[in-house]
Image: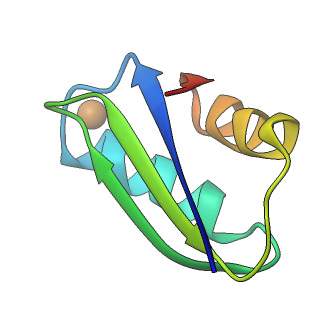
Amino acid sequence: MAEVQYKVTGMSCGHCEASVRGEVSKLAGVEDVQVSAAAGTLKIVSTSALSDDAVIAAVDEAGYSAVRA
Ligand SMILES: [Cu+2]
């Protein structure tokens, strides 16, 4: 299991969290996704290490920007 955290900018409410969670959940190997709009954080638990590019692209797809925390 691998766990990584990102800082996400632009989220303001539960819908934003759900959008990010939905996109990130599509990535292969993702087991758990925790998103906090208030804290601007994204925590991902996956069966194997994820590429930063893939995570950042998924968050971008949801309409937000992520950087590795
Ligand atoms: Cu929102």
* 47 displayed left or right of 15: right
Residue 2 appears at what percent x and percent y? 63, 69
Q: Residue at x 33, y 48 (%)?
A: 17
Q: Quadrant of ligand 1?
A: top left
Residue 19 appears at what percent x and percent y? 47, 50
Q: Residue at x 85, y 47 (%)?
A: 51
* 50 displayed left or right of 12: right
Residue 37 appears at what percent x and percent y? 23, 35
Q: Which of 61/32 is in front?
A: 32
What is the quadrant of residue 42 in the picture? Answer: top left
Q: Which of 35/11 is in front?
A: 35
Type of colouring:
rainbow
What is the quadrant of residue 36 in the picture? Answer: top left
Q: Residue at x 18, y 30 (%)?
A: 39
Query: Quadrant location of the N terminus?
Result: bottom right
Q: Residue at x 78, y 38 (%)?
A: 52
* 57 displayed left or right of 19: right
Q: Look at the picture and state if 9 lies above or below 8.
A: above
Q: Look at the picture and state if 27 lies above or below 9.
A: below
Q: Residue furthest left?
A: 38
Q: How many marks?
A: 0
